[in-house]
Amino acid sequence: MFDRLKHWFSQVALKKDAGKLDPAHLPTAKRAGDTPFEEQRLIVLDLETTGLNTGKDQVIAIGAVAIDRLSIPLRDQFDLVLRRPELDIRETVLIHGIGPEALTRGHETEEALLRLLLWMDGDPVLAFHADFDRRFLERTLKTQLGYGASHTWLDVAEILPALFPGALPDKARLDDWVDHFALEVSERHHAAADAMATAELALIALHYARRQGIESLGQLEHKLRVGRRLKSMKSH
C-alpha cells in the first residue's frame, strides 16, 4: 500500500507544471571552482542498470541526494524508477529488486530525465565509481534527449583514500567505507539508498578536507590530480 501511495505522489509531482519542461533551456553545467564548500550545492548520484556494460545496458532507476552547504536536506532528493517495460532484467533483478511490474509503472523516461536535469541545476556530481554512472547517464541523456553537455564529476571512491590514506585499500567497496565509518544504511543496491550512503561518506570527506585546508571543489580536484600524477610516476 505504501509503495502505491509513494508512486502516486511521485507521479503527481512529475506531472505538476510539466508544460514548463523545455529541453532547449536547461541549466548550464558548473565547473569545479573556488566556491567554498559551505556555499556549494553538490549532487550525489547512483544508478540502477540492467547490467554493467555501459555500451549496451540501460538505466532503469535514478537515485540522487543533494549536499547543500555541507548538510544533506532530506527534502532535496530525487528517486525514480523509469518506465522501461521492454527491457530484460532477468539477470539483475535479484540484485536491485526492480521487477517487470515496477518498470511498467515507472515514470516516462524523457520527462524523468528532464526533471533530473532541472533538479540538478548544473551542479557538480559526486558518485562512487563515478565513471560508471557518468557513462551510463551521459549516454542515456544523449539517446533520449539529444543532451550532450558534460557535467563536472568527482569520484568518492577516489576522494576517500586520497583524504584517508591507509584506512582501506584503494579499491575498497562502498560497503567497506560504510563499515569503516560505522554508518547505518537502510538497504543496499537501491539507487536512493546507495546515493544517501555515498552522500554521507562524501560529507565526512568534505568536513575532513576543510580541516586539511581544502576549502573548495576546485582545490579538492587539484589534490586528486596531484595524487594521480604521483601514482603514475611510481608505476614507471
Image: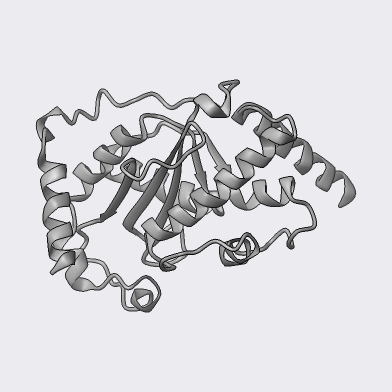
Question: Where residue 71 sits in the image (x, y, percent)?
Answer: 47, 39
Does residue 231 appear in the picture of this structure? yes
Does residue 85 appear in the picture of this structure? no
Q: Residue placed at 44% from the left, 53% from the top?
A: 196
Colouring convention used in this rendered image of the protein? one colour
Front-most of residues 40 and 23: 40
Q: Residue placed at 40% from the left, 29% from the top?
A: 122
Question: Where 148 falls versus 129 (above or below)?
Answer: above
Q: Is residue 104 left or right of residue 141?
A: left
Quadrant location of residue 98?
Answer: bottom left
Q: Is residue 69 left or right of residue 145?
A: right
Question: Where residue 183 sits in the image (x, y, percent)?
Answer: 54, 61
Question: Where residue 174 sits in the image (x, y, percent)?
Answer: 57, 62
Front-most of residues 157 and 231: 157
Question: Where residue 15 sits in the image (x, y, percent)?
Answer: 11, 42
Q: Residue placed at 43% from the left, 48% from the top?
A: 45
Residue positioned most to the top: 34
Front-most of residues 158 and 204: 204
Q: How many dots with numbers?
A: 0
Q: Is residue 109 left or right of residue 52?
A: left
Q: Is residue 17 left or right of residue 179?
A: left
Quadrant location of residue 189?
Answer: bottom left
Quadrant location of residue 187?
Answer: bottom left
Question: Where 121 falls versus 80 (above or below)?
Answer: above
Which part of the image, by quadrant, shows the N terminus?
bottom left
